[in-house]
Amino acid sequence: MYGVVVCPRCRRAKGVRATQRTTACSCGATIPVRRSSLRARVERVTELPAAVRTVATAVAGGEREYGALLKPPRRRSAQVHVRVAAAVGSGDRRTKVLAAARGLTAEVIVFTREDFARVLSLLGLGDADAALESLRRENLLVEPRPGYFRVITA
Ligand SMILES: [Zn+2]
């Protein structure tokens, strides 16, 4: 039995014999080989190169998606604001403000003051700065990067 492990340091995929305890990566890291850490398993050593390629492609794909989450948000269509505003239910100003911020966070991960102001104006609510400030005072809002906000989801 053979398998494929992924180096925790450099993310390279490597073929191993499933019975070995550890393997050395070409980056110098020691990779533990456990049944649970095998990303793929094959019976014959001849099948190993294809399995390594498959795992390497999957790892690269996953990291592209993760990287996309970390990139600054693109300009978004007005649709997002309309959608978020439409999903906000009834209630007092605080309830609506919080629902708007939660909706934006769910849609775009981090939102700007302009995003927030647009949704509030669609709801007939003004003063986005005061609304952001009140959320911040309640410790419901974080600013992971200057000018970009998200609400804390419990
Ligand atoms: Zn490595």
Image (spheres, rainbow, N blue to C red):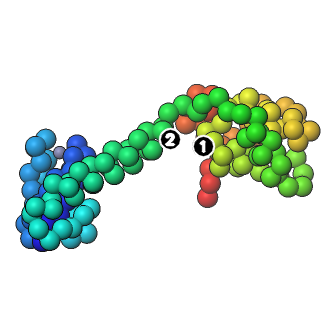
Relative placement, left or right, of 3 versus 139 is: left
Q: Where is residue 14 in the image (x, y as percent from the top left)?
A: 16, 53
Q: Which of 36 and 43 is in front in this view?
A: 43
Give the mark, 1 or 2, whose residue is nearer the N terminus.
2
Q: How many numbered badges does the structure rendering display?
A: 2
Residue 116 visible, this orientation: yes
Image height check: is 18 above or below 57? below
Q: Mark 1 points at which residue?
A: 109
Q: Mark 2 points at which residue?
A: 69
Relative placement, left or right, of 2 versus 70 is: left
Q: Residue at x 67, y 33 (%)?
A: 76
Circle 2 sits in a helix, a strand or a loop, which is it?
Answer: helix
Query: Image quadrant for the C terminus?
Result: bottom right
Q: Do the residues labelled 1 and 2 touch (CB within 8 Å)?
A: yes
Q: Residue at x 77, y 51 (%)?
A: 99
Q: In which quarter of the image is ligand 1?
A: top left
Q: Which of 99 and 54 is in front in this view?
A: 54
User: Tag on residue 68?
Assistant: none
Circle 1 sits in a helix, a strand or a loop, which is it?
Answer: loop
Q: How crowded is mark 2: few (under 14 residues within 10 Å), some or many (20 or more)?
A: few
Q: Position of residue 105 (x, y in %)?
A: 65, 45
Q: Nearer the viewer, residue 154 or 90?
A: 90
Per the model, the C-alpha gap separating discs 1 and 2 is 8 Å
